[in-house]
């Protein structure tokens, strides 16, 4: 079985500050890991994914995430927050040969002007 | 434009009145899936389909039905809706096999009174 835990259902950062959204996973097989973003009244959009190549993954809009097997983590970061980053972010896990995505409970990111 | 469409976007109905939420994709994807999103619970998979005429239960299938008669369409059927099915529903599609990106529709907000 696979699962994802996102620490912090709400995170607030000031504009220009570092964004750090935490994700820990549990998987009995090598995982594939994803971050999706959901803007208000929209569907989910892929930010980035880890597929067992480079452990540091760069995504859209300046976001990146690092896969750390020893810590079973895949935290999402962005050096400088922008007002347009305000959204809900979901971490998800799957594995080879398994299309099913198991999602975390989400983190709502608020940007303070 | 590659996209997943859902209709209707918003629906208010009464307990027991059968309804169908349509989902269509124009990317020739084999894999399609339905999720429900509830506050504090993230997205949970309802049903999925690996190809035409092949469907299977996800994590929360009770009270739902699906069909896959054509590759592009994957309707979600609630034969006797109940208030606990009030939720935000998303359809998604992807190529078969992981870790292909899943593309999400814009969502259908359903209220059952």
Image (spheres, coloured by chain):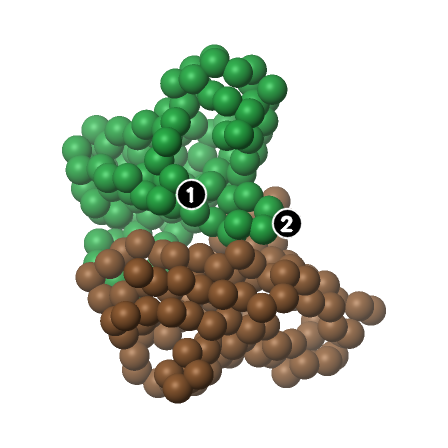
Chain colours: A brown, B green
Numbered tag placed on residue B108 in the rendering: none
Q: Residue A49's x, y, as percent?
A: 40, 70
Q: Secondary structure at mark 2?
A: loop
Residue B100 visible in the current orientation: no
Q: Residue B76's x, y, as percent?
A: 37, 30
Query: Which residue shows up at 65% across the image and 76% down it?
Result: A19
Which quadrant is the C terminus of chain B positioned in? top right
Query: Relative to residue A12, is residue B7 depicted above or below?
Result: above
Label 1 or label 2, whichever lies nearer to me, is 1
Residue A14 visible in the current orientation: yes
Numbered tag placed on residue A40 in the rendering: 2
Q: Quote the CA–CA distance across marks 1 and 2.
A: 17 Å
Q: Which of A26/A44 is in front?
A: A26
Query: Relative to residue B59, is residue B63 depicted above or below?
Result: above
Query: Which residue shows up at 56% across the image and 55% down it?
Result: A38
**Would you say A29 lies left or right of A42 here?**
left
**Would you say B61 lies left or right of A14 here?**
left
Q: Which of A12/A58 is in front?
A: A12
Q: Secondary structure at mark 1?
A: strand
Query: Which residue shows up at 63% across the image and 66% down it?
Result: A8
Residue that mark 1 sits on: B35
């Amino acid at each position: 079985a696979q699962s994802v835990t996102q620490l912090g259902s709400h995170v607030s950062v000031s504009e220009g500050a570092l964004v750090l959204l935490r994700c820990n996973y549990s998987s009995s097989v090598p995982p594939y890991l994803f971050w999706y973003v959901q803007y208000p009244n929209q569907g989910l959009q892929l930010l980035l994914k880890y597929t067992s190549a480079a452990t540091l993954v760069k995504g859209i809009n300046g976001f990146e995430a690092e896969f750390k097997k020893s810590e079973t983590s895949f935290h999402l970061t962005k050096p400088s927050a922008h007002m347009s980053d305000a959204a809900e972010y979901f971490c998800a896990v799957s594995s080879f040969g398994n299309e099913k995505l198991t999602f975390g409970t989400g983190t709502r990111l608020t940007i303070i002007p | 434009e590659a996209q997943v469409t859902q209709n209707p976007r918003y629906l208010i109905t009464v307990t027991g009145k059968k309804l169908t939420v349509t989902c269509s994709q124009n990317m020739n994807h084999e894999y399609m899936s339905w999720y429900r999103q509830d506050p504090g619970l993230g997205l949970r998979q309802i049903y999925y389909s690996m190809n035409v005429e092949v469907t299977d239960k996800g994590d929360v299938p009770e009270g739902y039905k699906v069909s896959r008669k054509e590759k592009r369409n994957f309707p979600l059927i609630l034969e006797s809706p109940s208030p606990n099915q009030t939720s935000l529903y998303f359809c998604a599609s992807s190529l078969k096999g992981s870790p292909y990106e899943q593309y999400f529709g814009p969502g259908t907000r359903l209220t059952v009174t």
